[in-house]
Image: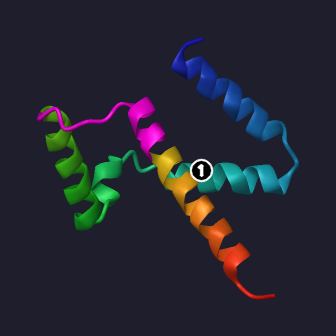
Amino acid sequence: MDIQAEKRQLAKLLLETENPNIIESVKRILKNDKSTDFWDELSPEQKSEIEKASLEIENGEVTDFETFMQKHRMDTAGIRSTNKRRAHSQPR
C-alpha cells in the first residue's frame, strides 16, 4: 500500500473512533514527530564517548563478545567467592 493510501486509511480510522484516548495519543505522536536526528539531542559528553568508541573500532581496539563475557564471568566469580569467604569468616 502506498503512503497516501495509508494516510487515507488512518484518517478514516481516526474519523470513525469515538475514543478520546486514541485521539489524544495520535495528537501526541504527531506533535512529537520532529524528524530530528537523535545525534542532535545528545549531550556533548555522549557525542564525545560515541566518537571515541568509533575511533577505537577503526583502530581495531575491539573485544569480541565471548572474550568480554569470559573476563566478566571470571571477575564476578571472584567477587562471589570473596563475598562468601567474608560471610563465613564473620562472627555470628
Circle 1 SS class: helix
Q: Foreground: 16 or 92?
A: 92
Of all residues shown, which one is farthest toward the right?
18
Quadrant for the C terminus, please.
bottom right
Q: Foreground: 87 or 1?
A: 87
Q: Residue at x 78, y 49 (%)?
A: 22
Q: Position of residue 7 (x, y in %)?
A: 60, 28
Of all residues shown, which one is farthest toward the top?
1
**Magenta span includes 32:** no
Please count the marks in the image: 1
Q: Is residue 59 left or right of residue 3?
A: left
Q: Residue at x 56, y 49 (%)?
A: 30
Label 1 environment density (alpha carbons within 10 Å; few <14, some 14–19, many ≥20):
few
Q: Foreground: 63 or 11?
A: 63
Q: Residue at x 29, y 51 (%)?
A: 39
- Note whether 31 is above or below 71 in the view shown: below
Q: In which image quadrant can residue 9 be found? A: top right
Q: Position of residue 11 (x, y in %)?
A: 68, 34
**Residue stretch in magenta:** 59-71
The chosen color scheme is rainbow
Q: Position of residue 72 (x, y in %)?
A: 47, 48
Give amino acid for label 1.
Answer: Ile
Q: Is residue 20 left or right of residue 3?
A: right
Q: Foreground: 74 or 34?
A: 74
Q: Position of residue 32 (x, y in %)?
A: 51, 55
Residue on which the image places disc 1: 29
Quadrant for the N terminus, please.
top right
Q: Residue at x 62, y 56 (%)?
A: 28
